[in-house]
Image: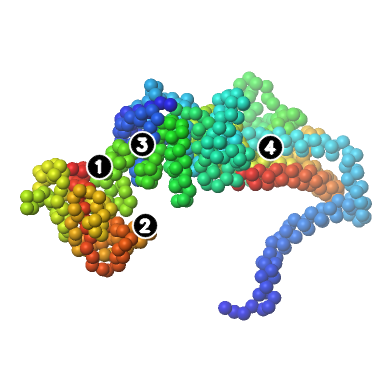
């Protein structure tokens, strides 16, 4: 064996060296952009002067901003709840069919999740489009009045949530399916002997056994859903009258399209404390439960 | 409490016949052990009785009720699983009371039953813990407690001790026996361990390839095996099998072992096998019937000494297991600790014919 220089013979030194690439990645891709955004948010529109928290106080005084906050929360809440419910139901359904047939169903169900969302949303846009859309064509054939999918506030929000659920539910499906498979079959047999019916088995065995996966998946989904950009961008561009803007699309509108990058940075930073608190609470509960189950 | 009747029970998985026609009558209060090698269908039989497995054909009766189509929860049976199957997110108390809570039993009654079962099993101080905080033996007790509180007609045990270490297994065996003496509930117990079968059972049911080979008291299956399989399966070390011929010598009917001694047969056995004279049979002789001297034999016939060459010696403390060559076969003998045979040595061992089993190689039946 070659003799290493003294510094490298010390284990801690080697360990630190091996971690350098990771530190570099985090520094370059997480820390730097984050602090740069913080820095940007404190500048004036021309990025020539330091204005402290003026950008934030300006936002807090604007009705549109608070509308975006409410919309983002509503969007994330409704979409995540439906994704979770549909994912759970689908996972259950797939888990009941024999293992041989499961692969093809799982593969098919995953399709919405693996297509680039910008692309699939374009397909949805084509379905929703008022003049030539397939859905409205079908509705009129059935003598149902055409629905203004993207031009009415309610329906525009509905459509965006629908597409987001369509894209995101398979993620829940996969996570739940893996979690369901990890529950020992004996537990269900024991419960059956104890007299549990299907619903009781679900509430007393399945749900408690996959609670951690539900919590982590939900947390993860809330984060990506709150930060969603592409669906709104492609379907409505935030319209009608800003009623479908989310944090990310509003930040884009303000920062890039209207040329006020510091204000855009301030909008996007607003999400951070909310998500941090949420993540802290959920992960603390997950740790506690994991400790009691393991 | 109830008796259990299996009538021509058959189970087919796709094309594989796992259980091929089981007939068994288990009277009330009896402790029956189904024993056999892996894949013999014993667990499948148990799971069919539990209702966890559909019945391909045949009937299962518990008490007077035909339960083929009765769901498990309505059969009033409790089962202890191999891996305990405790609910990990519930405390011991919640685990034990789960079945009663589902049946909407009054809270005070549940508390009393759980407390009583916990006292019987000595786990009263564990009621607040979760399964992961328990040792293997404690989990096993909780699993039994969960069965006891239900006060079922029948207990089913599916290899309950196979995950425990040898010492604990011995302890739990005694506890299960004590439990049955106390509760007298009809019990069906599945194991591949013949020691468990011998020690626990009122009646041992030896299974092989989906069929019952023999059902009888532990004594019967050990001393009067009906087939070669039962003879070879029960007992450790296993029974020695070697070819032999039945002949008449000096007015005695003897079994002449291949390359070995001629063993005079007791009169009754001689009468049964005389018609097989001249044919090659299989002789089954347990290791304890080959000893170092004649004096150890408690039987009425004296043994026949024979010179053998010792192959392997396994001293076990209270006895020594000796493997030796006889012609082409390796046989096994149990000798006392006062002799110290060594591998490679020539020595004289005494063959005791009073427990010799003669097997027809064509039918594998003991004659």
Q: Which residue is denoted by mark 4 in the rendering?
A: A80
Q: CA distance from mark 2 to mark 4?
A: 69 Å
Question: Disc 4 or disc 1, which is closer to the eye?
Answer: 1
Residue at (82%, 53%) from the top-left corner? A37
Q: Locate the N terminus of chain B and report the quarter of the image it occupies.
A: top left
Q: State the image quarter where residue B269 is shown.
A: top left
Q: Position of residue A175 (x, y in %)?
A: 60, 43
- Dot 4, crowdedness within 10 Å: few (<14), some or many (≥20)? many
Cα–Cα gap, marks 2 and 3 = 28 Å
Q: Nearer the viewer, mark 2 or mark 1?
A: 2
Asked if marks 3 and 1 fall on the same chain, the answer is yes
Kindly identify which residue carries mark 3.
B202
Residue A262 image position (x, y, % from top left): 86, 50
Q: Of the residues under marks 2 and 1, which one precedes in the sequence?
A: 1
- Give the alpha-carbon distance from disc 3 to disc 1, as whole Å: 16 Å
Say which quadrant the C terminus of chain B sits in.
top left
Figure quadrant of residue A114: top right
Which residue is depicted at the point 6% across and 50% down?
B251
**Circles 3, 4 touching at the beta carbon (< 8 Å):** no
The chain carrying label 1 is B
Q: Element type at marker 4?
A: helix
């Amino acid at each position: 064996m070659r003799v290493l220089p003294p510094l490298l013979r010390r284990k801690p030194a080697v360990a630190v060296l091996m971690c350098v690439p990771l530190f570099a990645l985090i520094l370059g891709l997480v820390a730097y952009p984050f602090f740069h955004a913080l820095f940007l948010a404190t500048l004036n529109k021309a990025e020539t002067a330091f204005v402290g928290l003026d950008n934030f106080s300006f936002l807090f005084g604007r009705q549109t901003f608070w509308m975006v906050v409410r919309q983002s929360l509503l969007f994330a809440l409704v979409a995540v709840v439906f994704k979770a419910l549909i994912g759970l139901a689908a996972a259950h359904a797939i888990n009941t069919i024999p293992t041989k047939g499961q692969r093809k169903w799982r593969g098919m169900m995953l399709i919405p999740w693996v297509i680039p969302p910008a692309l699939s949303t374009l397909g949805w846009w084509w379905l929703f489009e008022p003049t030539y859309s397939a859905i409205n064509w079908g509705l009129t054939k059935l003598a149902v009045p055409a629905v203004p999918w993207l031009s009415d506030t309610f329906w525009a929000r509905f459509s965006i949530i629908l597409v987001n659920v369509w894209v995101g539910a398979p993620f829940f499906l996969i996570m739940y399916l893996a979690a369901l498979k990890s529950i020992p079959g004996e537990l269900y047999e024991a419960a059956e002997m104890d007299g549990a019916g299907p619903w009781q088995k679900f509430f007393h065995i399945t749900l408690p056994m996959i609670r951690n996966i539900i919590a982590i998946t939900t947390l993860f989904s809330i984060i990506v859903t709150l930060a969603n950009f592409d669906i709104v961008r492609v379907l409505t561009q935030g319209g009608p009258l800003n009623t479908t803007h989310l944090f990310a699309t509003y930040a884009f509108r303000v920062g890039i399209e209207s040329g006020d990058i510091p204000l855009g940075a301030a909008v996007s930073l607003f999400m951070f404390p909310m998500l941090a608190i949420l993540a802290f609470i959920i992960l603390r509960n997950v740790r506690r439960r994991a400790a009691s189950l393991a | 409490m109830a008796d259990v009747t299996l009538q021509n029970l058959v189970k087919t998985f796709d094309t594989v016949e796992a259980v091929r026609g089981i007939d068994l009558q288990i009277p009330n209060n009896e402790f029956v052990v189904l024993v056999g090698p892996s894949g013999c269908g014993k667990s499948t039989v148990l799971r069919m009785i539990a209702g966890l497995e559909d019945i391909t054909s045949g009937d299962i009766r518990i008490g007077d009720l035909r339960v083929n189509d009765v769901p498990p929860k309505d059969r009033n049976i409790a089962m202890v699983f191999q891996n305990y199957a405790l609910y990990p997110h519930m405390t011991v108390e919640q685990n034990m009371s789960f079945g009663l809570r589902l049946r909407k039993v009054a809270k005070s009654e549940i508390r009393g039953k759980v407390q009583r079962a916990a006292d019987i099993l000595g786990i009263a101080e564990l009621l607040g813990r979760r399964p992961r905080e328990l040792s293997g033996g404690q989990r096993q007790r909780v699993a039994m407690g969960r069965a006891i509180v239900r006060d079922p007609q029948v207990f089913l045990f599916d290899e309950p001790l196979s995950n425990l270490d040898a010492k604990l297994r011995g302890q739990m065996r005694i506890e299960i026996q004590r439990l049955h003496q106390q509760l007298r509930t009809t019990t069906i117990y599945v194991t591949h361990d013949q020691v468990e079968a011998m020690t626990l059972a009122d009646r041992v049911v030896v299974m092989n390839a989906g069929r019952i080979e023999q059902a009888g008291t532990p004594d019967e299956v050990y001393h009067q095996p009906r087939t070669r399989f039962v003879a070879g399966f029960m007992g450790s070390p296993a029974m020695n099998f070697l070819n032999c011929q039945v002949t008449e010598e000096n007015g005695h009917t003897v079994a002449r072992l291949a390359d070995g001694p001629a063993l005079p047969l007791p009169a009754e056995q001689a009468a049964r096998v005389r018609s097989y004279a001249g044919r090659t049979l299989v002789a089954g002789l347990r290791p304890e019937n080959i000893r170092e001297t004649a004096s150890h034999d408690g039987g009425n016939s004296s043994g026949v000494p024979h010179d053998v060459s010792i192959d392997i010696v396994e001293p076990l403390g209270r006895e020594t297991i000796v493997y030796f060559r006889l012609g082409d076969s390796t046989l096994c003998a149990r000798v006392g600790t006062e002799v110290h045979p060594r591998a490679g040595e020539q020595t004289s061992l005494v063959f005791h014919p009073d427990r010799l089993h003669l097997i027809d190689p064509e039918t594998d039946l003991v004659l």
